[in-house]
Image (cartoon, rainbow, N blue to C red):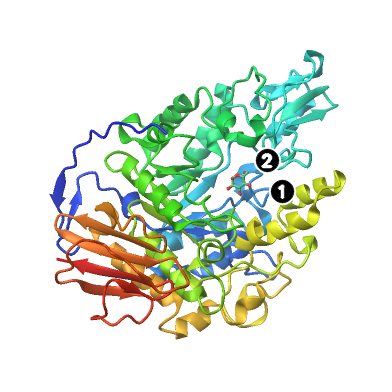
């Protein structure tokens, strides 16, 4: 991967508001934010239909406020037939019936702002739903004014060159439509036709939609699958086997930067909103070109290399350290990163990166949270991780709800493939693991709903839930709040430089964060065994600020218990 020259001068201002430490001149609220991601379908149901909703979120705003976070990112809440849980939008200016009404939205955002919480919305415009009015028009005739809002390939041109679909049952991204004797393109499911970003009218429609929401007061956009939006509409033939590495062919299409600049010019620059796209291209150069401030495109890079490290067979901490250190160094002076280990497309953080065995679950979950809150970049924290929620128990395929998972299972049946191996993989890696209902208390259905939940509650909810953890001062929940407080009050943890220590230690991740003489040492044992670290820097006056394991202030700094995490302030 190519690194850009690091030629950026940091200016420092003295700001009195953060414990007398200094903060850089390019201080931004979205750099200091901790973004809490809410999966609305699974957060809190207010009306007993088994599906989370906006009134449910409203009822939990005080819980969210108490976490100390200051930004919420909400997965899509627009009208949708829910082929892909809202990532198939049928009306971008309306609220999904399951989730409530626009009046509910207005009270939700008012309630958030009253509490000092900002709102980032998901913008799904690589594709729409096939039930969107644009698509209904588009498919109705070849001369319809909306025809070019989507990608069509007329049958008389012969077969289009193959395109891989991530979600289609046959992985074929072209779907034949007899109404006009043509194929349409869908990188995701058949019900998610790709929008044609090469059409200026479509782009204008999207900017108008964005202004509609910005005028309603939202504070940012997360652009879903946007790396795929720009396409070479001649649809050239890709080399054999391209689908094994389709990102190289799909991401960062021809005019993507122009479109982002146009979007920035029309929308982002007119409001105080933050912007982040899912994915950051294929190289550091791509990522920088998307987010370096002087280019006026997006604010921060949400890259996948880190989150993708955990595999069903495990991962190596040396690899983990190498990846996060490499990304940090590429963004040391220009650009800004998202720090993330989990989201709604992944199994649970503690099950993937930590250890969800009862004796280690809370410890390793706190250790991972310590990592997220002490790295440079904006942490994205997935709802439920603050409780140490784990992967669930899925007995058979009927317990799963995720459309691509069900499609792939059916596909394997059709081709006589290995469905039991796939089921095993789904249990460990399936997206539904991260989508089970939020565990509020020990009552029926974890207090999520009074009805039948759309997906089963994790059977461990009586032990792991917000009510139980609220009462236990040693819980993941209390620890998370302490971490948030520490980050919020220390600009060194936001803006400070990062130095990796004891690089070759296979069990311990050790690093410092430093800003203008204020220095923190972070020690994280990623293993279930005791571990030693040799950090090779003076520890004079080391003061223990936080520990996940009752560490005594005078215990030897170099020895760590299983999954121990601690933060020291150094002189
Ligand atoms: C993104 C979303 C994912 C969705 C897909 C299609 O990757 O995060 O949940 O299924 O886009 O919209």
- Residue 530, located in which quarter of the rendered image? bottom left
Q: Nearer the viewer, residue 351 or 510?
A: 510
Q: Is residue 140 above or below residue 458?
A: above
Residue 231, given in percent of the width and then of the height, sits at 59, 25
Quadrant location of the N terminus? top left
Q: Which residue is mark 2?
A: 166
Say the numbered circle drawn on residue 404. Answer: 1
Is residue 443 depicted above or below 482 in this figure? below
Disc 2 within 8 angstroms of ligand 1 (CB): yes
| Label 2, residues with CA under 10 Å away: few <14, some 14-19, many ≥20 | some
User: Outermost residue toward the bottom?
Assistant: 471
* Neighbours of disc 1 within 10 Å: few (<14), some (14-19), many (20+): some
Q: Is residue 99 visible?
A: no
Q: Is residue 19 left or right of residue 348?
A: left
Q: Are marks 1 and 2 in contact (CB under 8 Å)?
A: yes
Q: Is residue 419 above or below residue 255?
A: below
């Amino acid at each position: 991967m190519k690194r850009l020259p690091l030629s950026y001068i940091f200016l420092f201002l003295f700001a009195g508001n953060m414990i007398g430490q200094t903060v850089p001149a390019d201080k931004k609220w979205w750099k200091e934010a901790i973004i809490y991601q809410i999966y609305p379908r699974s957060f809190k149901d207010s009306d007993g239909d088994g599906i989370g909703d906006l009134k449910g979120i409203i009822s939990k705003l005080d819980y969210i406020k108490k976490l100390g976070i200051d930004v919420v990112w909400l997965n899509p809440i627009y009208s949708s037939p829910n082929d892909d849980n809202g990532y198939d939008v049928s009306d971008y200016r309306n609220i999904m019936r399951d989730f409530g009404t626009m009046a509910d939205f207005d009270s939700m955002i008012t309630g958030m702002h009253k509490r000092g919480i900002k709102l980032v919305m998901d913008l799904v415009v690589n594709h729409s739903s096939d039930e969107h009015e644009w698509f209904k028009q588009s498919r109705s005739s070849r001369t319809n004014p909306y025809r070019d809002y989507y990608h069509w390939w007329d049958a008389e041109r012969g077969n289009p060159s193959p395109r891989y679909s991530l979600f289609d049952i046959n992985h074929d991204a072209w779907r034949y439509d007899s109404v006009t004797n043509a194929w349409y393109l869908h990188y995701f499911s058949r019900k998610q036709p790709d929008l044609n970003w090469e059409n200026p009218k479509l782009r204008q429609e999207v900017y108008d939609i964005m202004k509609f929401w910005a005028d309603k007061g939202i504070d940012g956009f997360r652009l879903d699958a946007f790396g795929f939006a720009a396409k070479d509409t001649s649809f050239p033939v890709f080399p054999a086997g391209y689908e094994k590495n389709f990102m190289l062919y799909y991401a960062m299409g021809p005019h993507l930067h122009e479109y982002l600049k146009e979007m920035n010019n029309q929308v982002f620059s007119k409001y105080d909103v933050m912007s982040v796209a899912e994915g950051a291209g294929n190289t550091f150069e791509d990522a920088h070109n998307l987010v370096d401030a002087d280019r006026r495109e997006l604010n921060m890079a949400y890259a996948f290399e880190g989150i993708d490290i955990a595999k069903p067979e495990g991962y190596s901490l040396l690899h983990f350290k190498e990846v996060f250190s490499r990304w940090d160094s590429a963004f040391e002076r220009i650009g800004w990163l998202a720090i993330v280990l989990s989201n709604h497309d992944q199994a649970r953080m503690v099950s993937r990166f930590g250890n969800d065995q009862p004796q280690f679950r809370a410890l390793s979950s706190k250790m991972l949270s310590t990592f997220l809150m002490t790295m440079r970049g904006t942490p994205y924290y997935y709802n439920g991780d603050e409780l140490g929620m784990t992967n669930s128990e899925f007995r058979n395929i009927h317990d799963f709800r995720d459309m691509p998972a069900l499609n792939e299972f059916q596909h394997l049946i059709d081709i006589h493939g290995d469905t039991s191996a796939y089921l095993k993989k789904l249990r460990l890696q399936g997206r539904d693991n991260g989508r089970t209902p939020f565990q509020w208390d020990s009552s029926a259905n974890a207090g999520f709903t009074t009805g039948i939940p759309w997906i089963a509650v994790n059977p461990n909810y009586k032990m792991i839930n917000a009510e139980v953890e609220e009462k236990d001062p040693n819980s993941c929940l209390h620890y998370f709040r302490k971490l948030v407080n520490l980050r919020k009050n220390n600009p060194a943890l936001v803006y400070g430089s990062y130095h990796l220590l004891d690089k070759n230690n296979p069990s311990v991740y050790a690093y410092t964060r430093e800003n203008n003489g204020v220095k923190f040492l972070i020690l994280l044992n990623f293993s279930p065994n005791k571990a030693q670290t040799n950090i090779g820097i003076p520890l004079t006056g080391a003061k223990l600020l936080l520990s996940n394991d009752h560490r005594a202030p005078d215990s030897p700094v170099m020895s760590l218990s299983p999954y121990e995490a601690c933060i020291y302030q150094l002189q």
